[in-house]
């Protein structure tokens, strides 16, 4: 019996998923985590809480599934990206980790974001990325910066505890602004711009490669085998892609969570930083991925549900499943600013075309259409080479059949809804652990999950939705000018 363990370090919890050799779930354990916000715009976590959470999930698995845990042959890691864990001598943590959603380094990001940085990394330097955080520490906490010997991403801090070595992998490293994303290696020049050098960086491996072996003392404590393979793993979205089978060019997934993500796998490196599209390495060797983000997807539906005092599913279920023609009411879902393609933190949402007859159904349809159009913006940002043939739908919003039919029509591709099951980042991490332990071909391991329904574009309404999207696009510059004036 050979099993595999996925550890997903999320912002709000650490999840462990144990699967067997046939990729069937054996057990799942989750432990909550808290975020500290000591000042406005700050977001931090104590890395010690990650270690404590991992000890807790492993202890629970040992207590409830001792034989299955003892049979683990490979461990994979996933985690929230962009965080900065600063280590000093003897790998001692110097301060709380600055998280992905911390905005304190917006000035430093603007300074680092120039033509040279975009040419090397393939991305805009966003405030949430790791490099500007280190420049901020150098300016505001110089006594701490002087002691920094290593900088680790969150999941790689957990890896250090597991294997006793500082190692990272390509998909997570691509979100630091220190990686030459096309070459899949650290950039001396980008490190220099942040006052660092290669000595501050962990060793790099691919997500399916072996990063090290489980430390003997941990193996003894939890009834596992010493030296159990720990895979490189992946950043949370890359690991999620592995979980839903996005492992080959032309495949992708559509996440309709609070925010919306359009993730497509590509065989080549084709960055488009001017569109605020993320171009990162995939966790699978030889692949990259492009990722567009809209900040308020299902979050927009949740906002409307609070406004109308109706549950989100009641609003969307009332639309049925037959796709209507585009409505006259237009919604821009910029409730918290927008990422792709505008990179505009100050823009805000709007309803355009309200009239005396506007009712909750019209408002619901407009919100769903507005988010679909924002995902179309993400698709267009990637250019013709990144257009997928099919997208796997995940997230709370994927429960609406109407929305998925609308998405298929607006994006011009099939939307596939998986059967109920756990196909998230922890599952993807476990699959990466399987590949590292066995040497299996990722394409054979990272298969698409069983599909419950497939939604095809409504060809009779495609032209009308294309025209509606163009009207949607025309509103942004007008709204931007109005807010500036």
Image (cartoon, helix red, strand yellow):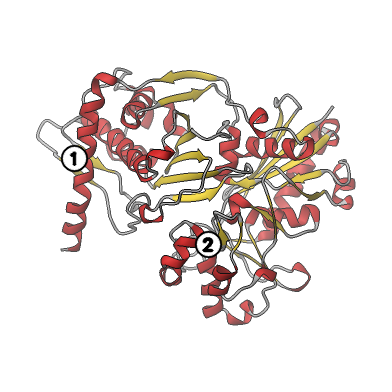
Q: Quadrant of residue 402?
A: top left
Which residue: 28% across, 55% down? 347
Give SS at disc 2.
Answer: loop
- In whole angstroms, how far apart are the C-alphas of marks 2 and 1? 35 Å
Residue 436: % across, % down: 75, 40
Q: Quadrant of residue 469?
A: top left
Q: Quadrant of residue 63?
A: top right
Residue 285 vertical position relative to residue 427 in the rendered view, above or below: below
Q: Using a 10 Å C-alpha cutoff, classify the residue at mark 2 as few (fewer than 14 neighbours), some (14 to 19) or many (20 or more).
A: many
Residue 68: % across, % down: 82, 31
Q: Using a 10 Å C-alpha cutoff, classify the residue at mark 1 as few (fewer than 14 neighbours), some (14 to 19) or many (20 or more).
A: few
Give SS at disc 1.
Answer: helix
Residue 4: % across, % down: 76, 35
Which residue: 59% across, 26% down? 421
Find residue 471 and name its label.
1
Residue 50 vertical position relative to residue 125 in the rendered view, above or below: above
Find residue 66 and name its label.
none
Circles 2 and 1 in contact, beta carbons < 8 Å: no
Find residue 177 and name its label.
2
Task: Please indicate whether residue 164 sits to the left or right of residue 123 in the image.
Answer: right
Badge 2 or badge 1: first in the primary sequence:
2
Q: Nearer the viewer, residue 437 or 55?
A: 437
């Amino acid at each position: 019996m050979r099993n595999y363990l996925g550890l997903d370090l999320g912002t709000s919890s650490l999840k462990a998923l144990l699967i067997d050799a046939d990729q069937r779930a054996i057990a799942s354990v989750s432990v909550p985590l808290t975020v500290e916000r000591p000042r406005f715009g700050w977001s931090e976590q104590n890395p010690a809480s990650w270690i404590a959470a991992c000890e807790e999930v492993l202890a629970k698995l040992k207590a409830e599934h001792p034989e299955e845990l003892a049979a683990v042959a490979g461990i994979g890691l996933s985690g929230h990206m962009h965080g900065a864990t600063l280590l000093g001598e003897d790998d001692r943590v110097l301060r709380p980790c600055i998280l992905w959603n911390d905005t304190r380094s917006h000035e430093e990001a603007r300074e680092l974001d120039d033509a040279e940085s975009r040419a090397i990394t393939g991305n805009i330097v966003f405030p949430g990325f790791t490099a500007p955080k280190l420049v901020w520490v150098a300016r505001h906490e110089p006594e701490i910066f002087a002691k920094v010997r290593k900088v680790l991403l969150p999941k790689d801090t957990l890896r250090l505890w597991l294997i006793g070595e500082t190692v990272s992998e390509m998909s997570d490293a691509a979100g630091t602004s220190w990686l030459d994303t096309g070459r899949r290696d650290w950039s001396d020049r980008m490190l220099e711009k942040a006052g660092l050098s290669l000595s501050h960086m962990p060793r790099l491996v691919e997500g399916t490669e072996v990063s090290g072996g489980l430390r003997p003392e941990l193996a003894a404590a939890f009834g596992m085998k010493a030296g159990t393979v720990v895979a490189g793993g992946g950043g949370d979205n890359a690991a999620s892609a592995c979980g839903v089978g996005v492992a080959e060019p032309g495949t992708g997934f559509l996440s309709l969570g609070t925010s919306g993500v359009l993730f497509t796998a590509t065989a080549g490196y084709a960055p488009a930083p001017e569109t605020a599209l993320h171009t990162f390495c995939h966790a699978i060797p030889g692949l990259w991925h492009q990722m567009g983000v809209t900040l308020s997807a299902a979050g927009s539906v949740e906002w409307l549900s609070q406004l109308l005092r109706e549950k989100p599913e009641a609003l969307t279920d009332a639309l049925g499943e037959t796709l209507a023609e585009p409505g006259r009411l237009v919604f821009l879902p910029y409730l918290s600013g927008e990422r792709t393609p505008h990179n505009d933190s100050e823009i805000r949402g709007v309803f355009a075309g309200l009239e005396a007859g506007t009712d909750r159904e019209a408002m619901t349809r407009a919100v769903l259409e507005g988010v679909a159009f924002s995902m179309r913006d993400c698709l267009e940002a990637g250019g013709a080479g990144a257009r997928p043939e099919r997208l796997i739908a995940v997230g709370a919003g994927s429960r609406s059949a109407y929305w998925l039919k609308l998405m298929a029509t607006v994006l011009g591709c099939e939307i596939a809804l998986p059967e109920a099951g756990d196909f998230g980042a922890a599952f993807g991490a476990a699959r990466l652990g399987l590949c590292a332990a066995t040497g299996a071909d990722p394409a054979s391991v990272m298969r698409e999950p069983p599909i419950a329904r497939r939604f095809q574009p409504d060809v009779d309404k495609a032209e009308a939705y294309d025209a509606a999207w163009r009207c949607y696009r025309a509103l942004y510059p007008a709204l931007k000018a109005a807010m500036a004036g």
